[in-house]
Image (spheres, rainbow, N blue to C red):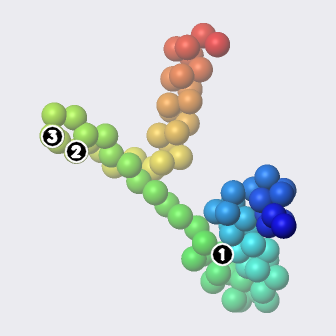
């Protein structure tokens, strides 16, 4: 018998993310706010060139600029 999350086409990590969100939303106001803050992530990346670290940037802004560059440069 397959797991329900697998049968639904979810990865295990996605299943855990959905379950965590459901639990956070079911909490009372104050504990819910604290849990939501813990669930937020802010990832930073830096590009290295010639052995030197470049500027730290947020992952979301790097993804947006890469997607825009790909869309304008690829012509697809």
CA–CA distance in space, label 3 to label 2 = 7 Å
Q: Nearer the viewer, residue 5 or 44?
A: 5
Between tags 3 and 2, which lies in front?
A: 3
CA–CA distance in space, label 2 to label 1 = 32 Å
Q: Quadrant of residue 32?
A: bottom right
Q: Nearer the viewer, residue 27 or 23?
A: 23
Q: Earlier in the sequence, mark 1 or mark 3?
A: 1
Spot occupied by residue 29 in the image (x, y as percentages of width and height)? 77, 86
**What element does badge 2 sit on?**
strand
- Residue at the spot 79% in from the left edge and 74% down from the top edge: 22
Q: Residue furthest front?
A: 1
Residue 53: mark in rendering: 2
Q: Quadrant of residue 68?
A: top right
Spot occupied by residue 37 in the image (x, y as percentages of width and height)? 60, 75
The answer to whether residue 26 is left or right of residue 45 is: right
Spot occupied by residue 11 in the image (x, y as percentages of width and height)? 69, 57
The answer to whether residue 36 is left or right of residue 44 is: right
Between tags 1 and 3, which lies in front?
A: 3
Q: Nearer the viewer, residue 9 or 71?
A: 9
Circle 3 residue: 51
- Residue at the spot 60% in from the left edge and 10% down from the top edge: 75
Q: Is there any visible trace of residue 48 in the rendered image? A: yes
Spot occupied by residue 38 in the image (x, y as percentages of width and height)? 57, 77
CA–CA distance in space, label 1 to label 3 = 38 Å
**What element does badge 1 sit on?**
helix
Quadrant for the N terminus, please: bottom right
**CB contact under 8 Å: marks 2 and 1:** no
């Amino acid at each position: 018998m397959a797991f329900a999350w697998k049968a639904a086409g979810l990865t295990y990590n996605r299943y855990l993310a959905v379950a965590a969100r459901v639990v956070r939303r079911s909490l009372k106001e104050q504990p819910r706010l604290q849990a939501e803050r813990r669930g937020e992530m802010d990832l930073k990346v830096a590009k290295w060139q010639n052995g030197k670290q470049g500027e730290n940037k947020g992952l979301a802004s790097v993804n947006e600029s890469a997607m825009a560059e790909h869309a304008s440069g690829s012509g697809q």
